[in-house]
């Protein structure tokens, strides 16, 4: 990378973390790991549509287990991106919705989801071609 390129991409980290911010990445990796994981992105996309009950989320996020959904919404709640409201009914009704911080994330997640949909076919074709050239790579 050029010196100019490095300065451009690292300047926000230095401002946010100070000159020694590179040593522990100031928690950026931890935040990106959370908001960038497969299930969190899909839950945020669904909650961007409005308040959802647990079962509604589970039906909307195809392939997620009850346990993984529970962990995902708890982690998002811990990070301040989702609120969980328990209603005193029998059985108890639990609703999930994005917080203001979670809402501020939705345009980024939506853009990523849109990009994925737009490029899905091209990526699938590239993978097919690469796999044909490297049949024993073990990469899938």
Image: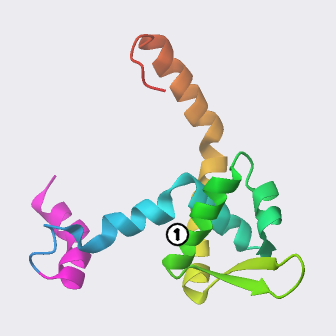
Query: Can see residue 50?
Result: no
Q: How is the image coloured?
A: rainbow
The answer to whether residue 114 is left or right of residue 104 is right
- Which secondary structure class fits the magenta region best? helix
Residue 68 occupies quadrant: bottom right
Q: Position of residue 12 (x, y in %)?
A: 26, 77
The segment highlighted magenta reads 1-18
Q: Position of residue 81 (x, y in %)?
A: 56, 79
Q: Is residue 16 magenta?
A: yes
Q: Residue at x 80, y 72 (%)?
A: 53
Q: Position of residue 63 (x, y in %)?
A: 71, 45
Of residues 71 and 119, the one drawn nearer to the viewer in this rendering: 71
Query: Residue tagged by mark 1?
Result: 75
Q: Is residue 137 above or below residue 60?
A: above
Of residues 84 and 101, the one drawn nearer to the viewer in this rendering: 84
Q: Which residue is drawn at 77% across and 77% down?
A: 94
**Which element is circle 1 on?**
helix
Q: Residue at x 57, y 71 (%)?
A: 74
Q: Residue at x 40, y 69 (%)?
A: 31
């Amino acid at each position: 990378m050029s010196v100019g390129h490095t300065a451009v991409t690292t300047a926000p980290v230095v401002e946010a973390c100070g000159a020694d911010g590179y040593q522990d990445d100031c928690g950026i990796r931890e935040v990106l790991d959370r908001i960038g994981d497969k299930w969190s992105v899909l839950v945020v996309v669904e909650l961007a549509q409005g308040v959802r009950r647990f079962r509604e989320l589970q039906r909307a996020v195809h392939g997620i287990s009850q346990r993984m959904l529970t962990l995902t919404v708890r982690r998002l709640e811990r990070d301040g991106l989702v609120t969980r409201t328990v209603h005193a009914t029998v059985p108890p009704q639990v609703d999930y919705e994005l917080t203001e911080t979670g809402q501020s994330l939705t345009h980024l997640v939506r853009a990523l989801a849109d990009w994925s949909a737009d490029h899905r076919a091209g990526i699938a074709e590239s993978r097919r071609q690469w796999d044909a050239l490297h049949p024993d790579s073990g990469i899938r």
